[in-house]
Image (tube, rainbow, N blue to C red):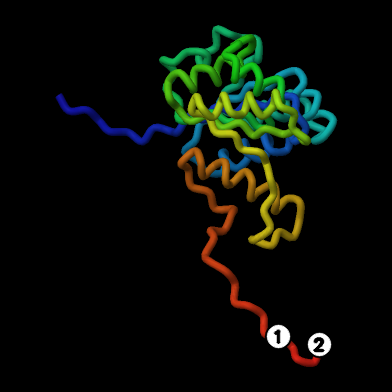
Amino acid sequence: MHLVQTSLPKRIIVAISGASGAVYGVRLLQMLADLGNVQTHLTVSEAGLLNLQQEQGMNRGDIEALAHVVHPVHDIGAVIASGSFQCDGMVVAPCSMRTLAAVAHGLSDNLIARAADVMLKERRRLILVVRETPLNLAHLRNMTSVTEMGGIIFPPVPSFYHRPQTLADMIDHTVSRVIDLLGLPQPHAPRWTGLLPAAPIDPSAE
């Protein structure tokens, strides 16, 4: 008996919680859809939906249309709540400090925290795009706890070496780095190729 090898799509869980920066979750879903061979599973908290409405002018139908599968945030019986569900990674973008704390302490009190807990216990890739500043000691300790458990803390800190021209450039670069961490190809962010040649000094300017 010969097994037929098939190219199965990568499964990525995307969670949107109640921190500012809902655009990161939106853009992540869009960019994953552009890759073609990725199946996205979405869950959004009530506060996350509120921020989508306030910051992006999106309703529930708008954001759910960007995902392949949608799971209500209180459906603890959803497939993504089980370690038997084969999954290639999970991103919480943005990740509120409340969600960070729930993950750090293993609360599993909604589907976002439960799915994240599953990722940690199954030793799978978990990325938290934490969005808060300044940070208090509880925030920092929770980030340390998640890191010690194998999760990745990824604050959406903008970079400037690629000389972004627009806010969209900066958002795309951040989301592209997240996709990199998932081990997926991303065509939007140029790779670092070394320093640019120094500009010649104009003697007349002295």
Pointer 1 and pointer 2: residues touching (CB < 8 Å)? yes
In front of the other: 202 or 69: 202
- Classed neighbour count for the residue bearing mark 2: other residues with Cα under 10 Å, few (<14), some (14–19), many (≥20): few
Circle 1: element type: loop
Question: In the rendering, at what x and y percent does residue 107 appear?
Answer: 61, 11
Question: In the rendering, at what x and y percent does residue 11 appear?
Answer: 48, 29
Q: Residue at x 51, y 41 (%)?
A: 181
Image quadrant where one finds the C terminus: bottom right
115 sits left or right of 30 in the view: left
71 sits left or right of 97 in the view: left
Q: Residue at x 75, y 24 (%)?
A: 18
Q: Height in image: 136 above or below 77?
A: below
Question: In the rendering, at what x and y percent does residue 37 appear?
Answer: 47, 38
Question: In the rendering, at what x and y percent does residue 16 appear?
Answer: 68, 27
- Classed neighbour count for the residue bearing mark 1: other residues with Cα under 10 Å, few (<14), some (14–19), many (≥20): few
Query: For the residue marked with disc 1, what is the amino acid?
Result: Ile
The residue singled out by tag 2 in the image is: 205
The label on residue 201 is 1
Q: Residue at x 68, y 45 (%)?
A: 157
